Image: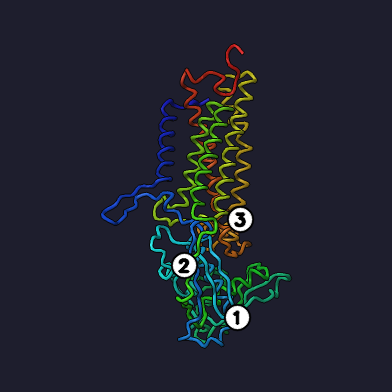
Amino acid sequence: MKRGRRPTFFILAVAILTFTYFSLFGLSNYYGDNKITYIKGVNDIRWGIDIRGGVEAVFMPDLEDTDLEDITSAQIDQATSIINVRLVDNNITDAEVYPDKTRKQIVVRFPWQVGETDFDPAEAVKELGATAMLRFCEGTTNEKVVLQGSADIGSAQAVPDPENVGQYAVSLTLTSQGAAKFAEATERLVGQQISIWMDDVMLSAPTVNQRIPDGQAEITGNFTSEEATDLANQINAGSLPFNLSVDNSKLKIISPTMGEQALDVMAMAAVIAFVAVCVVMLALYRLPGFVACISLCGQMALMLACISGFFGNFSSFTLTIPGIAGIILSIGIGVDANVITAERIREEMRGGKTVDGALEAGFSRGFTAILDGNVTVIIVAIILMTAFGPPNSFLGKLLGWIMFMFKSSITGSIYSFGYTLLIGSIGTLIFGVGLSRVMLRSLSRFRRLRKPWLYGGVKDGE
């Protein structure tokens, strides 16, 4: 058995605890009244509406460009779809978007930005931006534009796929200008892909099967009726003949439904629960329990870091109630991984093996169960994030070639749950499996820490 070097435990423990500190508190400095943030912490997390409150805004067609009576219910649905795409793509996962077709308007409720102090709803709503631009581009990047906006793109609708019974396709109608451009592009790109983009979000990337000269095309991809309708709505939303404007007279501030002190209560509950778990782990498993407490700190720190924007220039991820549920579930999975390993080691010690033999056998016997459980959770989390997140998210880009059957429906709360669950499971494998074993092996090299009862065995004399 490779037992590792003695200093390894101390190096890893200090690194994990330092990482935990900065993931919680960050690192910043003030120059006068200006705050400079070097490392983001918990205070840089964007909290959901229930926890911190937010803004309610009403979007309406711009009457300078369009007669209100000409706006149809279908167009309102299309605009609703694109606002949903914008919100989740910007990591705003706790938002409510619903159309009011009678008044021809769209109501949007979303949380405050990180660091908001003025609580000015008119300023906050600028984050959502204007109506998005739809583009068709060569290949799977948005660099070479083929078609763009309502000047080229007329409309899209979901239709039954004539070649696949029970499946649907998206029928596309182009303007005369767009038809000429598309005919030239499809002639050049037969056998290649033309991707469909909404701002920087790739909605689809169908392969060109033949030249399309008449401005009538079909996008196929084993779509269900709902998936084809969603894609058609997103395409139509980018080619609306009108802009959306905000009715400033209807801007509202939303109070947190859980109360102003909800976040403090949750933080206190989390600290108490974590301390209780550590006490139980120490009491039952002794030295492996001590190492487990340190690894749980690292796992928790990794989840908070990935939410707050700790790493590089990644923006804060909106932490919703379902997202918090994902964190809690992930911590439970992490505890379970450490319990499985500690129990296996204790069984081996009571079976008469030496410390080295018990550690080796315990790690080996527990690994398969831990790996299987976490890989299963990771797969579920990936499916949730792919099915309910924006198509140009990291996982959407990385796994789009094998996840094509999952058409995004842009449900931010489920996306948030999947995100925290994914990070938590990865953290379990890194800290609860990998680093825990390295640290425990390192401690086992100290003579005074090689007593069997420290690993769950029987005390001398018992």
Judge depth for marks 1 and 2 and give the one in front.
1
Q: Earlier in the sequence, mark 1 or mark 2?
A: 1
Q: Residue 291: horizontal and vertical position, in percent?
A: 51, 31
> Please, what is the three-letter code of the amino acid marked with disc 1?
Thr
Q: Earlier in the sequence, mark 3 or mark 1?
A: 1
- Quadrant in which the C terminus is drawn: top right
Residue 194 can be seen in this image: no
Q: Quadrant of residue 368?
A: top right
Name the residue carrying label 3: 383
Q: Residue at x 57, y 59 (%)?
A: 413
Q: Residue 376: horizontal and vertical position, in percent?
A: 63, 47
Q: Identify the secondary structure beneath mark 1.
A: loop
> Which label was assigned to residue 290?
none
Q: Quadrant of residue 126?
A: bottom left
Judge depth for marks 3 and 1 and give the one in front.
1
Q: Earlier in the sequence, mark 3 or mark 2?
A: 2
Name the residue carrying label 2: 200
> Which label was assigned to residue 102?
1
> Please, what is the three-letter code of the amino acid marked with disc 2?
Asp
Q: Nearer the viewer, residue 273 or 371?
A: 273
Q: Residue at x 35, y 47 (%)?
A: 27
Q: Residue at x 47, y 27 (%)?
A: 442
Q: CA distance from mark 1 to mark 2?
A: 31 Å
Q: Quadrant of residue 282?
A: top right
